[in-house]
Amino acid sequence: MPSLNLILMAGMPGTGKSTVAREIGSVFGFPVIDKDVIATALLDAEIPEDQMQPAAYDTCFALTRDLLMQHQSLILDTPAVHPIVWERAQALCNQAGATLIPVLCVADRDIRNHRVASRVAMRSQPAGQSRTPGYARERFAHLPPDRIELVTDGELPDVLDQVIRQLRSRGGV
């Protein structure tokens, strides 16, 4: 039986997490659970904004648990800025016997700001300028040191080659 993996995407808005997640999903045949899609659906259903974020995360983790229990590897696309996201993902992987692989996407603030300003945003996605300077790695100190870290400043094919190579080198993916 193939290895069971949860790839946890992490990074600031505009680092390319969702783009990379969809591409990885396509290569490996893994479904992608995108927190922003769920959060936007909740906002569209008129869930108050202060309740939307916790409900979006709870829904992401319920879907993640369900797929892991079906022995389906997947990608969870969420900023993962808060340590609780890592902790909940790790707990689900421990329960399902899955390997948790964090992928941290980083990009310089100017690039992130340009991407955020240029994209067609979902209702749940932030707009405006990031106040976090540089690459914002310090926001992700809760992720383990063996995480895959992608500098997404470059061309998408190069970034994808890098992450796919690293995922394959971990075995089982």
Image: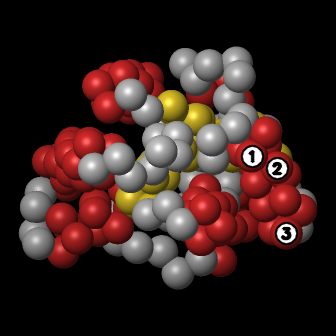
Vertical side of 82 occupied by 76: above or below: below
Q: Earlier in the sequence, mark 3 or mark 2?
A: 3
**Three-letter residue code for mark 1:** Arg
Q: Single out the residue that lies furthest toward the bottom.
A: 120
Image location of residue 166, percent across then percent down: 79, 43
Image location of residue 22, percent across then percent down: 57, 68
Vertical side of 46 occupied by 171: above or below: above
- For mark 3, give the secondary structure: helix
Q: Mark 1 points at which residue?
A: 168
Q: Residues within 10 Å of mark 2 (few under 14, many from 20)?
A: few
Quarter of the image where one finds residue 33: bottom left
Is residue 166 rendered to the left or right of residue 115? right
Q: Do the residues labelled 2 and 1 touch (CB within 8 Å)?
A: yes
- Mark toward the viewer: 3 or 2: 2
**Three-letter residue code for mark 3:** Pro
Residue 64 appears anywhere in the view: no
Q: Residues within 10 Å of mark 1 (few under 14, many from 20)?
A: few
Quarter of the image where one finds residue 141: top right
* Label 1 to label 3: alpha-carbon separation: 16 Å
Q: Residues within 10 Å of mark 3 (few under 14, many from 20)?
A: few
Which label belongs to residue 165? 2
Q: Mark 3 points at which residue?
A: 157
Name the colour scheme.
secondary structure
- For mark 1, give the secondary structure: helix
